[in-house]
Image (tube, rainbow, N blue to C red):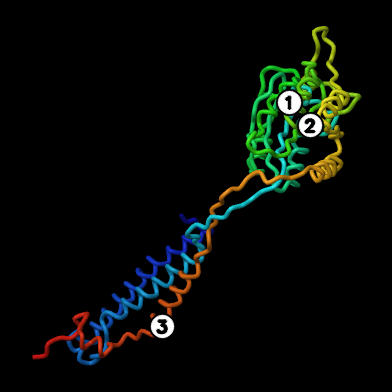
């Protein structure tokens, strides 16, 4: 296996055909000039040690030097080295509310964007913990299984929106139950659910779901976004607010953060509730709580490590460059005796 670090240097190989083209022009010019001065047979008598082949050989050496130098600049990484990496941490599932109430703008820019930024900030400070993501409204759907790939987690996180689920409402029990299925029974690690929501629960089964999670050894930390005063749910078209969501009586719906529900869920698993509006406070809270949890070795992965192999190419380039510099265009006597290039002619 191999990989190339700097493909952009490959364009320098375009110098080689230009070099050979220029060499051809010079050779042609020399021959025309020599033909004006003397016949080829007389020229051989005047310059008997002149080699016909060595100029081309010098060009070959110089071309190989350029080629190897360019390959060295591209920094090829060849070969594999297997490394066993052991990680210690906890399994964390982020359960993120994507119901329409998360569009409320009582926290800038709105609740769902605040939630996504909050999760992203938490991911930035994690080290070796495994993470998973689910989204939920009236039902819960998996987004990312347990993984250590934080880059993938952020990609799936950015894709979350309030239109991804057609059924609306907030079923916290479904979110908790689905999160519980993400944990691997074979790896007995500390299991944590970070539930981010405004706390509006339309199922009224969240406490029972939290109790089931507690039986599985899962600890739930809840984060409430939004304000207790609440805000209307904007209905936008092309980013412009056209109206606000209304109930069956035509009254504008005001959605409020329900911290009590989130507190009950956290208490059921010996977890804690934290106000999610203050990002720094959340980060400090998460850091302290994760430090308090026992981290266990949960995984040993083999990673393929590539080693830099530019050194042999640069050494080869230097070698061919030296050969080009110290190779003269006159005939070599011992090679001439061997007549490898048919440079000797029979004299009559």
Residue that sits furthest to the right in the current view? 229
Distance from label 1 to label 3 (Cα)?
Answer: 74 Å
Q: As rendered, which of 243 and 157 lies closer to the eye? A: 157
167 left or right of 115 in image: left
User: Which label belongs to residue 27?
Assistant: none
- Res. 257 in view: no
Q: Which residue is mark 3?
A: 325
Q: Which residue is mark 2?
A: 220
Question: Going from the N terminus, do you reach mark 1 or mark 2 first?
Answer: 1
> x, y percentage for residue 324?
39, 80
Distance from label 1 to label 2 (Cα)?
Answer: 9 Å
Q: As rendered, which of 221 and 166 lies closer to the eye? A: 221
| Residues at marks 1 and 2 touching, judged by CB atoms closer than 8 Å | yes
Is 340 above or below relative to 292? below
Q: Which residue is mark 1?
A: 176
Number of on-image labels: 3
Which circle, 1 or 3, is nearer the viewer? 1
> x, y percentage for residue 34?
26, 83
> x, y percentage for residue 273?
85, 32
The quadrant holding residue 179 is top right
Distance from label 3 to label 2 (Cα)?
Answer: 73 Å
Question: Going from the N terminus, do you reach mark 1 or mark 3 first?
Answer: 1
155 left or right of 337 in image: right
SS for callout 3: helix
Which circle, 3 or 2, is nearer the viewer? 2
């Amino acid at each position: 296996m191999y990989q190339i670090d700097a493909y952009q240097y490959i364009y320098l190989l375009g110098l080689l055909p230009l070099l050979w083209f220029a060499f051809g022009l010079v050779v042609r010019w020399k021959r025309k000039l020599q033909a004006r001065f003397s016949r080829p047979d007389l020229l051989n008598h005047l310059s008997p040690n002149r080699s016909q082949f060595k100029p081309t050989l010098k060009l070959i050496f110089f071309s190989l030097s350029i080629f190897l130098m360019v390959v060295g600049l591209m920094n090829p990484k060849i070969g594999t080295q297997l490394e066993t990496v052991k990680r210690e941490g906890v399994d964390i599932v982020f359960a993120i509310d994507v119901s329409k109430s998360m569009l409320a703008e009582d926290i800038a820019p709105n609740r769902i964007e605040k939630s996504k930024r909050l999760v992203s900030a938490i991911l930035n400070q994690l080290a070796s913990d495994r993470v998973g993501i689910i989204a939920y409204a009236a039902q819960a759907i998996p987004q990312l299984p347990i993984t250590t790939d934080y880059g993938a987690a952020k990609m799936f996180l950015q894709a979350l929106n309030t239109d991804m689920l057609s059924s609306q409402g907030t079923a916290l029990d479904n979110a908790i139950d689905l999160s519980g299925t993400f944990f691997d029974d074979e790896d007995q690690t500390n299991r944590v659910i970070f539930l981010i929501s405004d706390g509006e629960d339309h199922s009224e089964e969240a406490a029972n779901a939290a109790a089931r999670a507690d039986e599985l050894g899962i600890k739930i930390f809840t984060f409430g976004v939004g304000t207790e005063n609440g805000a209307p749910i904007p209905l936008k078209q092309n980013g412009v607010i056209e109206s606000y969501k209304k109930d069956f009586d035509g009254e504008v719906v005001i959605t409020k953060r329900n911290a009590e529900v989130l507190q009950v869920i956290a208490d059921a698993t010996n977890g804690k509730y934290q106000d999610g509006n203050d990002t720094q406070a959340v980060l400090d809270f998460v850091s302290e709580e994760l430090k308090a949890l026992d981290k266990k070795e949960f995984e040993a992965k083999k990673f393929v490590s590539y080693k830099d192999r530019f050194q042999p190419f640069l050494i080869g380039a230097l070698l061919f460059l030296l050969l080009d510099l110290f190779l003269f265009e006159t005939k070599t006597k011992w090679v001439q005796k061997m007549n490898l290039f048919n440079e000797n002619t029979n004299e009559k």
